[in-house]
């Protein structure tokens, strides 16, 4: 008898865990390891947010809130969406969850029926297909080519839509590519989506980390599309609050009620003191000051990494314009040998890097890009230089 449910069995394990654990163990053993694996800002949460949390604790704000979140926080989120994105929502349209990943889970559970197809552009964040499968849906992976800046074209999107298509996932800016769609590009996708009349799950968690491109929410393309869009965002990346676990969705009222109902039985409300700290994060002018400093730092690191990578052929890459990731193509090394190891995949290349160069990168098989590695520049300038120099030296050692 199979005692494990099929939905659990079909979830793929992460290919990154072994390499990440190996790098951590080497560091614990005192070795000088440079890690480009970070998926979070290397900044402390701003002091004013910490103080707001302390005030909430001292003030006794430690009890349950409504399952969908404290009304004050949902009103603050609605105000943020109006100010930053030109989107009109009332607080009842907002559901606050235990991080944006939880928000995504709620969204898929609320709209996907067994057998429904969900279009996911590749490269993608590795969790998207797994969440679709947990909702008994079918992930439909559509490649976004490097030649197009890893951005899906309207033609490719239209070709992927079938009678069973239920939703389209848009991560903008993107993890792992750092790609950012322009307003013009998003409006072109919006035309296809409106014609297809399908849901859009718009993951905008990196929205504030754009370099040279103004962020635009696809929900703002039209009122009709807004009705069919679930905007997903959170406090993790913008305010360096990854461990606080505060994410949120904005959607039409019917979907919001469905997600709130699901959450009420799964987890109830998100952490109460963290919710009140999030109100301060969104409302204080200190937030924009912090974000400006952090964004400028990431932009400087991005340009440093790009300048170094340009000199590291045959590695290839598309210059990122958002988030804090760069994907480097290692296709030229497939079939080549180093130290008796023949590279057959990005995982092989990543394992060689950690074993020979003491550099941790994330292989992108699980991101739908089997000949790429992901590097995060949420690390110091010193480590960017040190780590990329180590990668360059190892690349030069390969046998022809």
Image (cartoon, rainbow, N blue to C red):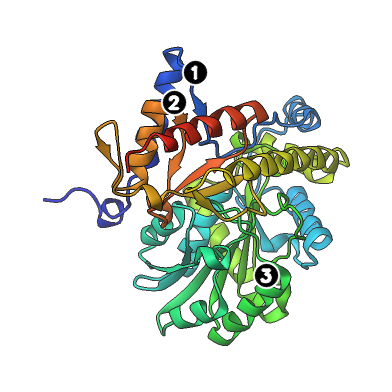
Pointers 2 and 1 in contact (C-beta within 8 Å): yes
Disc 2 and disc 1: Cα gap in Å? 7 Å
Circle 3 sits in a helix, a strand or a loop, which is it?
A: helix
Residue 225 occupies quadrant: bottom right
Q: Which quadrant is home to the C terminus?
A: top left
Q: Residue furthest bottom?
A: 195
Disc 3 and disc 2: Cα gap in Å? 41 Å
| Image disc number at residue 32 | 1
Residue 398 occupies quadrant: top left
Pointers 3 and 1 in contact (C-beta within 8 Å): no
Residue 276 in view (yes/no)? no
Pick whichever, 13 or 249, lies toward us. 13
The location of residue 85, given as percent across then percent down, is: 77, 63
Pointers 3 and 2 in contact (C-beta within 8 Å): no
The location of residue 58, given as percent across then percent down, is: 76, 24
**Picture layout, residue 28 above or below residue 85:** above
Query: Badge 3 is on which residue?
Result: 218
Q: Earlier in the sequence, mark 3 or mark 2?
A: 3
The location of residue 347, given as percent across then percent down, is: 35, 42
Query: Badge 2 is on which residue?
Result: 358
**Picture layout, residue 339 above or below residue 225:** above
| Image disc number at residue 309 | none
Residue 108 in view (yes/no)? yes
Circle 2 sits in a helix, a strand or a loop, which is it?
A: loop
Q: Residue furthest top?
A: 30
Identify the residue shown where x is 68% and y is 38%.
301
């Amino acid at each position: 008898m199979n005692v494990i449910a099929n939905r659990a069995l079909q979830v793929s394990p992460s290919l990154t865990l072994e390499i990440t654990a190996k790098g951590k163990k080497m560091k614990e053993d005192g070795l000088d390891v440079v890690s480009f694996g970070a998926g979070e800002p290397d900044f402390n949460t701003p002091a004013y947010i910490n103080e707001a949390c302390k005030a909430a604790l001292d003030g006794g704000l430690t009890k349950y809130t409504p399952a969908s979140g404290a009304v004050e926080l949902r009103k603050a989120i609605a105000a943020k969406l109006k100010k930053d994105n030109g989107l009109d929502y009332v607080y009842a349209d907002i559901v606050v969850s235990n991080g944006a990943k939880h928000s995504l889970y709620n969204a898929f559970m609320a709209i996907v029926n067994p057998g429904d197809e969900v279009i996911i552009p590749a490269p993608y964040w590795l969790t998207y297909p797994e969440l679709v499968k947990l909702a008994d849906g079918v992930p439909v992976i559509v490649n976004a080519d490097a030649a197009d800046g890893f951005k899906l074209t309207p033609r490719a999107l239209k070709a992927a839509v079938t009678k069973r298509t239920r939703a389209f996932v848009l991560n903008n800016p993107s993890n792992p590519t750092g790609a950012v769609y322009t307003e013009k590009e998003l409006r072109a996708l919006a035309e296809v989506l409106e014609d297809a009349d399908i849901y859009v799950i718009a993951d905008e968690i990196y929205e504030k980390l754009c370099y040279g491109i103004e962020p635009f929410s696809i929900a703002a393309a039209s009122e009709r599309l807004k009705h069919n869009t679930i905007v997903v965002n959170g406090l993790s990346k913008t305010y360096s609050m990854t461990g606080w676990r505060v994410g949120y969705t904005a959607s039409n009222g019917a979907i919001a009620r469905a997600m709130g109902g699901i959450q009420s039985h799964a987890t109830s409300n998100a952490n109460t003191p963290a919710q009140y700290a999030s109100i301060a994060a969104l409302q204080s002018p200190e937030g924009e000051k912090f974000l400006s400093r952090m964004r400028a730092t990431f932009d400087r690191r991005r340009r440093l990494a790009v300048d170094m990578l340009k000199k590291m052929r045959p590695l290839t890459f598309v210059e990122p314009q958002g988030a804090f990731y760069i994907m480097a193509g290692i296709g030229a090394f497939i079939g080549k040998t180093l130290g008796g190891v023949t590279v057959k995949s990005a995982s092989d290349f990543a394992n060689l890097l950690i074993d020979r160069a003491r550099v941790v990168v994330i292989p992108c098989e699980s991101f739908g890009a089997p000949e790429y590695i992901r590097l995060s520049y949420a690390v110091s300038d010193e480590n960017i230089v040190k780590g990329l120099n180590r990668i360059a030296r190892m690349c030069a050692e390969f046998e022809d």
